[in-house]
Amino acid sequence: METEKSINIVFANTAEAFEDILVSSGGSDEGQKRIRHELALSQRAFFWEDDNKIVVTPFSIPEELLDLNSNILKFSNTSNYSPRNGGLNLSNSIDLYNFKELVGEKDVVISPYAITSSFLELVEKAREIGIDVFVDGEPSKGGYDLIRYLDSKSGFRKEVEKLNVSCPEGYICQTIEELENKIDWFKTNKRPFALKADQGESGWGLILVDDPQTTTDSLINQVTIETIWSNGPYIIEELIDVDATVGGGTPSAELFVTESEVKITYLCGQIVINGEFQGTVVGNGSIPLDIAKKLEESALVIGKHFQSLGYQGIFDIDYVISKTGEIFAVETNARRTGGTHVYDLAKRLFGADFQNHSFISNDHFEYIDDIKSIGELLSRVSTLIYSKDSKKGIIITLINETDHILGYVAIGNDLGIATNIAEELKNLLT
């Protein structure tokens, strides 16, 4: 495919990847808030890859934010497209004939957040009406079934257990009765444990149990009531006493896999509060060098195994590090992740030298209700916005006006500077 005759499409189907569990919980206020947040996360797609792209999102990225970040990153040929009737399922929202007018006669290289069944159907229909589409990151075999399998907690555990990679002692339970028996086993042996929904996401569908007085009935009741646990299987595994001083206790490795290559793009620490993912720490100061080496060795073993199964594209591996220094692989996300945009904007700003700078991201920052517009919000934080001269500051990555939530990346030459900048933002907006 000739580059000058092609057009790059970044496809931010972030909510679509979790459509089933979002719909099942959408009847509550909390469920609606979660849906709005997943839709807002699509705004991070602006930072994926480099310039010269169309970013397709369920709803438009706020114009003020688009203009600000285009100027910071020196994007001159990046635009945003959203369908007239956007929704949870971005693939099903696309009017292909309108889309065909958008891309013209050019071939399309499309790079999604996640490969989903709806996305693959969209690609097939696009080809049927004459749009020449190449999918970046499509598995060489296994298709969506492979992605769904690896992305599940049970599939990941089954595959890692085949390798020379440590994971916490645990079990895959097919029924509630089996889960109940394993809960009782951990409690009888006075061992803290974690319960995981097979298709959990960002801490949703995760129950951490370190109190032996927690009743089995209360846990089973929670699993039975919450929709994310519907149908099983259920994973129960030893709860590792993590060393929070090392990558937050839960470091992650992101990889890029093709038929011929397996490479680690970056390592990061994760910011996890009460089991829920909040953001990442990337670059200088994020992971000690000795731990980074061990993570890389483990991640390459898993990456090569995934490659042999037919996986291609981006994925990450989440780890926990015990206070005794042991490293355990706990799950994978077979898609782009909460740190992909941080890595891509870091590369855009600093190239290969990004490792000598520090980046702290937060996708869930709640700002005060008395800020009534995006213009007012950006004005309030204007003194902190990233400066190319000082090479430090804040980049706002998403804004959810309804719930007063924003995402950001704080940037500094070292972790202390980036942390101070994030704290200054907090002081301005809370």
Image: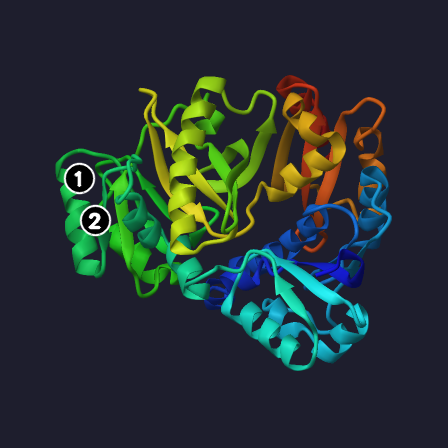
Residue at coordinates 80% horizontally, 39% vertically from top-left? 73
> How far across and how far down the image is residue 66, in percent?
81, 50
Q: Using the image, determine if residue 140 lies above or below residue 254.
A: below
Query: Circles 2 and 1: CB distance less than 8 Å?
Result: yes
Is 190 left, or right, of 111 in this rendering? left
Residue at coordinates 83% horizontally, 45% vertically from top-left? 75
The residue lying toward the viewer, choosing from 25 and 215, is 25
Q: Quadrant of residue 141?
A: bottom left
Is 355 left, or right, of 31 in this rendering? right
Q: Using the image, determine if residue 96 lies above or below residue 380.
A: below
Q: Using the image, determine if residue 69 lies above or below residue 290.
A: below
The residue under label 1 is which amino acid type? Lys
Is 160 left, or right, of 59 in this rendering? left
> How far across and how far down the image is residue 339, in percent?
58, 40
How packed is label 2: few (under 14 Cα within 10 Å), some, or many (20 or more)? some
Q: Which of the labelled discs sits on residue 187, or is there none?
A: 1
How packed is label 1: few (under 14 Cα within 10 Å), some, or many (20 or more)? many
Q: Which of the labelled discs sits on residue 216, or is there none?
A: 2
Residue at coordinates 62% horizontally, 38% vertically from top-left? 362
Q: Which of the labelled discs sits on residue 377, or is there none?
A: none
Instruction: Report the Cα–Cα distance between label 2 and label 1.
Output: 9 Å
Of pointers 2 and 1, the one earlier in the residue sequence: 1
Q: Is residue 126 visible?
A: yes
The residue under label 2 is which amino acid type? Thr
Q: Element type at marker 2?
A: helix
Q: Element type at marker 1?
A: helix
